[in-house]
Image (cartoon, rainbow, N blue to C red):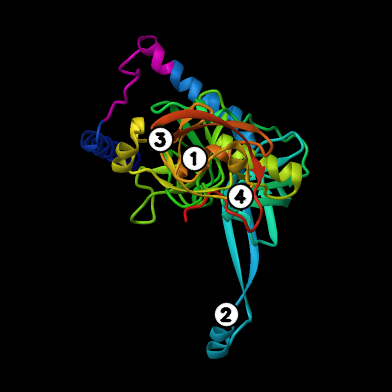
């Protein structure tokens, strides 16, 4: 009798459990995941090929892009120290990006990333942190050259930035906010952007660039460095779609000058110039309303020896028109000292070409400046 009662109790418990399980199954949220994509990869061959090539490009160039961390000690202002006390020095740090450009381990970056820093460490793609030696800086162009001693470094080719076309696709790689190996993609939005008094005509791109990207490469689809990311135009301090890069030809000239001479060498025409206004261009009979007006000529300078006179209008260098003073400065930064260039000069309504041998700028002389 007890055995029968026990069996009955067990059956009741089992039936109740089964009923509860069935009830919980009915109440459970049901879902069925998709088992196949909505499109077959074969239907999007071009997009899939582009996707694969993006990844191939970035993986190929990534080992040559570095993160740069630097530290320096800055004296505290004496008056501030007198009233506030505390340490007489302050430690500042900086983070930026760079790109390996030579087999010997030379790294190109922005001057503002490393100048004035006593300790510079280059972090490689494989995680190694290597001390770097600062070889030199060109403040006007905002280019610095470092060197590291490390095995397995692979340089990228410096491309011809003069051949860059507006609308072509580009990639920016760097360490924004310290986030290493970040890649953004965009197009060349414009060329010849003169944003400050440096004389550099920047490449403008809509590839996202933020703090920490400075000094990193702007690359074309061949993996060539066509620019060094340097600045953004922003009203908020963050990226708003306008990024600026130093053209590779300008950066290369600055780097080679530093490496060959150990110092910054600037080309010198020996003239002071102002932009040519449309009204003045029309009055002087200058076609195209482009060029610069010479307002001063250094006696016995390169321009004077070639026959350039005060109130001449320079319209082109080696056949390439210049839109103003900043454009002319930018062209000159790509010229070697001692190189012979042709200046298209307008005088009295007549045009001619004068051959000028570019000299090295004296430290206290006129350097193609505005008066």
Which residue is rendered at x = 29% and y = 26% of the image?
A: 32
* Number of residues whose C-alpha sits closer than 10 Å to that of mark 3, classed few (under 14), some (14–19) or many (20 or more): few
First of labels 1, 4 by sequence position = 4
First of labels 3, 4 by sequence position = 4
Say whether marks 1 and 4 touch (CB < 8 Å): no
User: Which of the 4 image quarters holds residue 225?
Assistant: top right
Residue 3: percent from the left, percent from the top?
35, 39
Q: Residue furthest front?
A: 348
Between circles 4 and 2, the one closer to the viewer is: 4
41 magenta-colored = yes
| Residue 328 marker | 1
Q: Nearer the viewer, residue 190 or 241?
A: 190
Which residue is rendered at x = 66% and y = 42% of the image?
A: 359
Say whether marks 4 and 2 touch (CB < 8 Å): no
Task: Say if residue 262 shows up in the picture.
Answer: yes
**Separation of residues labelled 1 and 4 (CA atoms):** 21 Å
* Number of residues whose C-alpha sits closer than 10 Å to that of mark 2, classed few (under 14), some (14–19) or many (20 or more): few
Quadrant housing the N terminus: top left
The residue at which mark 3 appears reads as 348
Between circles 2 and 3, the one closer to the viewer is: 3
Q: Which residue range is magenta in the image?
A: 31-48
The residue at which mark 4 appears reads as 299
**Separation of residues labelled 3 and 4 (CA atoms):** 22 Å
* Residue 241 position (above or below residue 316): below
Residue 27: percent from the left, percent from the top?
21, 37
The residue at which mark 2 appears reads as 77
- On screen, residue 312 versus residue 318, left or right, reads left
């Amino acid at each position: 009798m007890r055995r029968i009662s026990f069996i009955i109790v067990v059956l009741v418990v089992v039936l109740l459990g089964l009923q509860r399980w069935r009830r919980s199954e009915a109440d459970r949220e049901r879902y069925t995941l998709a088992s196949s994509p909505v499109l077959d990869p074969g239907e999007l061959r071009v997009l899939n090929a582009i996707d694969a090539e993006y990844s191939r490009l970035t993986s190929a160039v990534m080992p040559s892009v570095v993160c740069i961390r630097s530290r320096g000690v800055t004296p505290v202002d004496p008056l501030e120290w007198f009233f506030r006390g505390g340490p007489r020095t302050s430690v500042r740090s900086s983070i930026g990006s760079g790109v390996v450009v030579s087999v010997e381990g030379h790294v190109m970056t922005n001057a503002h990333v490393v100048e004035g820093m006593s300790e510079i460490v280059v972090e490689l793609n494989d995680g190694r942190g290597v001390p770097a030696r600062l070889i030199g800086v060109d403040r006007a162009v905002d280019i610095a050259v470092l060197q590291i001693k490390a095995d397995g470094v692979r340089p990228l080719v410096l491309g011809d930035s003069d051949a860059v076309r507006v609308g072509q696709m580009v990639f920016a790689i760097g360490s924004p906010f310290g986030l290493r190996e970040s890649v953004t993609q965009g197009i060349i939005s414009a060329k010849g952007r003169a944003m400050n008094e440096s004389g550099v005509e920047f490449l403008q791109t809509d590839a996202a660039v933020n703090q920490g990207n400075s000094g990193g490469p702007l690359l074309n689809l061949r993996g060539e460095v066509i620019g060094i990311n340097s600045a953004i135009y922003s009203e908020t301090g963050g990226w708003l779609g306008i990024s600026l890069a130093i053209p590779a030809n300008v950066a290369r000239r600055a780097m080679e000058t530093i490496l060959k001479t150990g110092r910054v060498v600037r080309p010198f025409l020996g003239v002071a110039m102002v932009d040519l206004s449309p009204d003045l261009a029309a009055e002087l009979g200058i076609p195209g309303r482009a060029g610069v007006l010479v307002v001063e000529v250094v006696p016995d300078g390169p321009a004077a020896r070639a026959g350039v006179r005060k109130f001449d209008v320079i319209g082109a260098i080696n056949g390439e028109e210049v839109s103003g003073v900043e454009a002319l400065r930018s062209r000159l930064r790509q010229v070697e000292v001692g190189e012979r260039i042709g200046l298209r000069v307008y005088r009295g309504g007549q045009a001619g070409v004068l051959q000028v041998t570019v000299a090295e700028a004296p430290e206290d002389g006129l350097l193609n400046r505005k008066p």
